[in-house]
Amino acid sequence: RHRAHAPSLPSFTQLLVSSTTNMLAPSAKLYNARARANVRAPSVRAARRHVAARAAVDTPSATSPATSSSSSPSSKRTVVITGASSGLGLNAANSLIKNGWHVVCAVRDFAKMEMKATQMNFPKDSFSVYHCDLASQKSVRAFAEALQVDGVNVDVLICNAALYLPSGRARWHPQFTADGFELSMASNHLGHFKLVHELFPLLKASAEAGRKPRCIILGSVTGNTNTVAGQVPPKANLGDLSGLAE
């Protein structure tokens, strides 16, 4: 009779080496059509045509890529929020809109953002929707170029969007973007790093105009009460966002 033995778990060093190897030398199989499709970003011109077409349905006189705006938000302070279609990003957008801000919603899914804006009764002239896939360096660059072309002021940038892949499959079989980066690293870190760099000229222009720009990096796990981090007191919440006005 043979005694069954449970397979031994890999050591921390083995995990580290394996993870590093996977990140630095992804196999050719991971560069498949599906991965590329997930991160392929439309050009600036294509993105603007898409949003302008949707905007024309609601506001025939619209000339900007806002999904539901026909007037310039230049008279309002403007905040860019990544991942504005759900969670903390959506609720931050709602609070800021109620306090007179114009919100640029940087999202991957136009239809989802429009649906959420309708459900939360966002005024038509209070928000604009632009495509931005943080997993794609090309998409981030196109988003920044679109803002510059449209003459959008950026007074505050809130880096909120994130991708959370805690499952075993994501750990042992990581996904890679078309740029060659691990998906969560590309979305959560490198994408926002690129975005801040690309929008820095607009933030600098805001400072020169005396508008006191801000760049806010959000770690939203502390705002999720379903996680251990979210239970650590004092519990994080949006408060009244008064710090943006100071």
Image: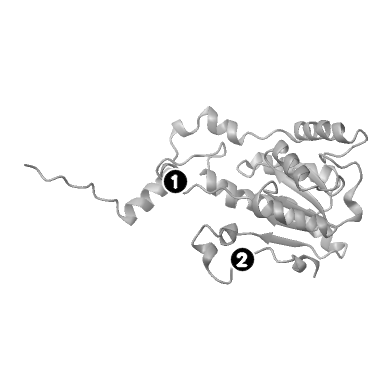
What separation in Å lies between label 2 and label 1 (alpha carbons)? 25 Å
| Amino acid under disc 2 | Ala
Comes first in the chain, label 2 or label 1: 1
Q: Which residue corresponds to mark 2?
A: 236
Residue 220 in view of the camera: yes
Q: Nearer the viewer, residue 213 or 63?
A: 63
- x and y percent of residue 153 in the render? 84, 53
Left or right, residue 245 beside residue 184: right
Q: Quarter-wise, where is residue 213 in the image?
A: bottom right
Residue 167 — which label?
A: 1
Residue at 80% x, 31% y is 49
- x and y percent of residue 230 in the render? 54, 63
Residue 102, compared with residue 110, is above or below; it is below
Crowd tier of the residue under label 2, counting other residues whose Cα lies within 10 Å: few below 14, some 14–19, many 20 or above: some
Please tell me whether mark 2 or mark 1 is closer to you in this view. Answer: 2
Determine whether label 2 and label 1 are within 8 Å by CB.
no
Residue at 63% x, 33% y is 40
**Quarter of the rendering occupied by the N terminus:** top left
Residue at 80% x, 47% y is 121
